[in-house]
Image (cartoon, helix red, strand yellow):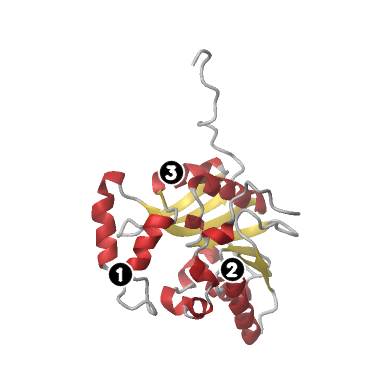
Amino acid sequence: MQSPRWRLDELAHAGAEHLDAEYVAGYERKTGYDPSGDLATLREFGLDQTSTLVDLGAGTGAFALAAAPFCRRVVAVDVSARMLTVLKAHATQRGISNLECVQAGFLTYAHQGEPADFICSRHALHHLPDFWKAVALARVAAMLRPAGVFRLRDLVSSFDPCEADRVLEDWFARASHRPEVGWTRAELETHVRDEHSTFTWLLTPMLERAGLKIQAMECSASQIYATYTCVKTGERFEGLDRDPPEGR
């Protein structure tokens, strides 16, 4: 079915670099991501050989590939065909047969089969403006089984808006000087200017409203990143959509 014209084009918002073959080839080295911590957390919440895991914004698959040996089924979802091509090649090289790749995003992925036991997303949600983040989180909750777990890490600001200049300049000052091994100042500035990171005090009620109860939350010392581990309760926070009193 064709996507409605009013829906956000996630591929267009993902950044041109995600379509560039050279960038994609060096993506894992640039991020320096070790999936063992996230995997250990999900295993503490019960991830095992019976589990279905969906990785939203899987990139080249560092987490999906690490999790596959511990799961029954893994679905790696990303808007970038180039990212998924690399992921598929890695899966073939490792002999992983329980991993599926789907080119889609938060707003277009249509989960098939039994509800997911676990959904994870790392550094992908910030590509969506806040309106679409809320829509995406509602879709995440709908994909999960009751008591299913959502693990989210992203660029989420835990500072007050009046502190933005100081915190961001501190972050930029620690940027890499070599783009092949880390994010440069120019890249971080582009993120702040053109992408859609939000604040913890905005994202937290979005999660709660979707029916995702926060079990643990950790903010980085830089106040730039936050990690949430949530459980689907089905109890949505309704405090913000009541009708105003008559006459107002």
Corner quadrant of residue 233: top right
Residue position for label 1: 175
Residue position for label 3: 202
Task: Residue type at mark 3: give it.
Answer: Leu
Task: Residue type at mark 1: give it.
Answer: Ala
Residue 53: % across, % down: 63, 64
Q: Residues within 10 Å of mark 2 (few under 14, many from 20)?
A: many
Task: Residue type at mark 2: give it.
Answer: Ser
Query: Can residue 196 be seen in this snapshot?
Result: yes
Q: Quadrant of the N terminus?
A: bottom right
Closer-to-camera residue (33/244): 244
Residue position for label 2: 80
Q: Is residue 190 shown left or right of residue 136?
A: left
Query: Can residue 45 be seen in this snapshot?
Result: no
Corner quadrant of residue 50: bottom right
Residue 127: % across, % down: 49, 57
Secondary structure at badge 3 equals helix
| 146 w.r.t. 52: above or below | above
Residue 11: % across, % down: 58, 61
Tell which tag, 2 or 3, sits nearer the viewer. 2
Which mark sits nearer the N-terminus, 2 or 3?
2
Q: How many marks?
A: 3
Task: Say which mark, if any, is on residue 40.
Answer: none
